Image (spheres, grey):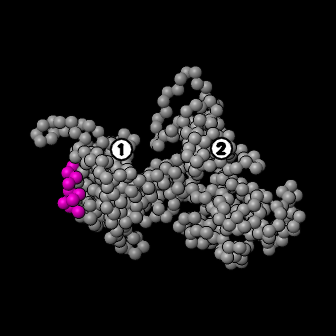
């Protein structure tokens, strides 16, 4: 067996996969010691405070050691996997080298370039953090989740029982990262699941069908709801509470919302509007050849209405720079759309939405939603938003008082569109009606400006021809 030297071992460090992130949790290893890897091969999936990301290795070689198990939160800059790039055979995993022979992780300044690739091992982001590189242990004991509901398991974000590793020699099943996480949450071994998706891809329904005693897929609840009374025959676990670690997307969202709520003085205004003409226009656009293959729904016209209202009242599209004591008015609109995902609430945004035609906006909205559902939203897609829309109406909610996305001055909440009695042309008639709510930062948006923006959005949705006359 070829002898491995310290010089032949490359330590791949946790990169900064976002913008200034300091840590990430290892969700899943796709390789084990002794496996051969090639430059660009995905070796693990990690979850940051913003998204789940697959990490490729920048070396050709043989995996020597995985430094951390799945479920461990690791600081950016910490070595997570060692690879022997000497071209030798796999190490004998049953005969580990003595402790004295284990190489210390080189500092960023000392780490050589990857052999065969001619580039540094840091793949994305802006380099490693200057903070400590200690391993962060889990806080407290693991909570049993075998008898928890699907919704509770979803909230655990990867802390459920992990599925067993695939047998040696078996090909890795084809599945998207959110489906892999769902399988992990439910304790399903993907190698035992029969795929029904295109090209042999395992779907969420396939995973649900593989759960013992479960015959059909059970959709995950997008929002928390009060549990229904249980039948008398149901036996409960002796555990009366379930503790869910605060981490990942939920931890980041909580910190951001608390910071926003206690930094920016929020004001929320409401308006109820007849959107019957807008709903008719939606149906007409679905038949228009310019929108063939595109997703056309009320949110598309609501987004366009907000963009027109911002154009008419540009000071609403701004941010408060506390350090410089300046109000920064943005001459572009990166339109954020709040999306509920299995990992929590995220707000990706459409870059330069103000410059897009209606078909282009429809295409961008469709891509944003599909990417969020697949769990593929990148950290960059959630940076730089200027104003946000949150559609609570999809849950049947009439309205709400949304909290500002940090760094933004306004957020529009859209309620459910319902058939209601409405005075139209002097007579009470059934009309499609919804309620809009606009929250804004009262430090830089006064009541007049906020009211004008909300009134403009309502006027456009009542008479959508204003999309043309006001543009």
Give x and y (percent) for residue 219. Answer: 51, 38
- Seen as rendered, the residue at the extreme left is 426
364, 240: nearer the viewer: 364
Task: Tell me, yes or no, if residue 134 can be seen here.
Answer: no
Left or right side of 374 for 260? left
Give x and y (percent) for residue 151. Answer: 54, 40
Q: Which residue is mark 2?
A: 190
Label 1 and label 2: CA atoms lie apart by 35 Å
362, 258: nearer the viewer: 362
- Determine the secondary structure under disc 1: helix
Task: Tell me, yes or no, if residue 121 can be seen here.
Answer: yes
Residue 40 located within the stretch drawn in magenta: no
Mark positioned earlier in the residue sequence (1 or 2): 2
- Determine the secondary structure under disc 2: helix
Left or right side of 406 for 10? right
Q: Residue shown at 61%/58% (left/top)?
A: 54
116, 230: nearer the viewer: 116
Q: Residues within 10 Å of mark 1 (few under 14, many from 20)?
A: some
Give x and y (percent) for residue 261. Answer: 41, 56
Residue 468 located within the stretch drawn in magenta: yes
Q: Looking at the rendering, in which quadrant would you find the C terminus?
A: bottom left
Q: Tell whether label 2 touches label 1 (CB within 8 Å).
A: no
Q: Residue shown at 36%/41% (left/top)?
A: 397
Please report the bounds of the magenta region as a residue range: 462-471
Give x and y (percent) for residue 257. Answer: 45, 55
- Seen as rendered, the residue at the extreme bottom is 109
Q: Residue shown at 25%/55% (left/top)?
A: 457
Q: Looking at the rendering, in which quadrant would you find the N terminus?
A: bottom right
Q: Which residue is mark 1?
A: 393
The residue mark sitting in front, 1 or 2, is 2
Quarter of the image holding residue 358?
bottom left
Q: Residues within 10 Å of mark 2 (few under 14, many from 20)?
A: many
């Amino acid at each position: 067996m070829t002898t491995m030297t310290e010089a032949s071992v490359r330590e791949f460090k946790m990169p900064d996969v976002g913008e200034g992130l300091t840590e990430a949790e290892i969700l899943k290893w796709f390789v084990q010691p002794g496996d051969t890897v090639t430059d660009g091969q995905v070796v693990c999936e990690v979850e940051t405070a913003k998204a789940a990301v697959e990490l490729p290795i920048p070396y050709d070689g043989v995996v020597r050691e995985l430094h951390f198990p799945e479920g461990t939160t690791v600081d950016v800059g910490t070595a997570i996997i060692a690879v022997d790039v000497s071209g030798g055979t796999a190490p004998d995993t049953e005969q580990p080298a003595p402790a004295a022979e284990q190489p210390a992780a080189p500092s960023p300044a000392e780490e050589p370039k990857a052999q065969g690739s001619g580039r540094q091992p840091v793949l994305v982001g802006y380099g490693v953090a200057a903070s400590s590189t200690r391993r962060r242990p889990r806080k407290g004991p693991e909570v049993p989740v075998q008898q928890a509901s699907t919704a509770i398991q979803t909230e655990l974000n990867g802390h459920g029982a992990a599925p067993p590793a695939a047998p040696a020699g078996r090909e890795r099943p084809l599945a998207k990262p959110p489906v892999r996480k769902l399988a992990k949450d439910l304790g399903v071994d993907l190698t035992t699941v029969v795929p029904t998706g295109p090209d042999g891809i395992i779907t969420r329904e396939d995973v649900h069908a593989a759960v013992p005693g479960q015959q059909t897929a059970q959709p995950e609840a997008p929002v928390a709801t009060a549990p229904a009374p249980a039948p008398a025959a149901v036996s409960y676990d002796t555990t009366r509470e379930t503790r869910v670690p605060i981490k990942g997307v939920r931890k980041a969202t909580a910190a951001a919302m608390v910071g926003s709520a206690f930094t920016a003085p929020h004001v929320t205004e409401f308006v109820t509007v007849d959107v019957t003409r807008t709903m008719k226009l939606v149906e007409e656009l679905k038949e228009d050849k310019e929108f063939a293959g595109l997703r056309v729904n009320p949110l598309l016209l609501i987004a366009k209405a907000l963009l027109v209202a911002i154009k008419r009242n540009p000071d609403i599209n701004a941010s408060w720079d506390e350090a410089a004591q300046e109000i920064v008015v943005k001459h572009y609109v990166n339109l954020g759309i709040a999306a509920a995902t299995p990992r929590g609430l995220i707000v990706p945004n459409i870059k330069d939405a103000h410059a897009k035609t209606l078909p282009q906006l429809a295409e961008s909205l469709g891509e944003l939603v599909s990417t969020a559902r697949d769990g593929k939203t990148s950290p960059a897609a959630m940076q730089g938003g200027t104003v946000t829309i949150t559609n609570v109406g999809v849950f049947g909610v009439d309205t709400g008082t949304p909290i500002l996305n940090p760094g933004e001055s306004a957020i529009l909440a859209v309620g459910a569109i319902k058939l209601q009695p409405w005075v139209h042309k002097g007579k009470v008639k059934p009309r499609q009606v919804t309620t809009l709510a606009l929250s804004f930062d009262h430090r830089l948006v006064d009541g007049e400006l906020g009211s004008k923006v909300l009134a403009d959005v309502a006027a456009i949705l009542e008479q959508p021809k204003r999309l043309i006359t006001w543009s």
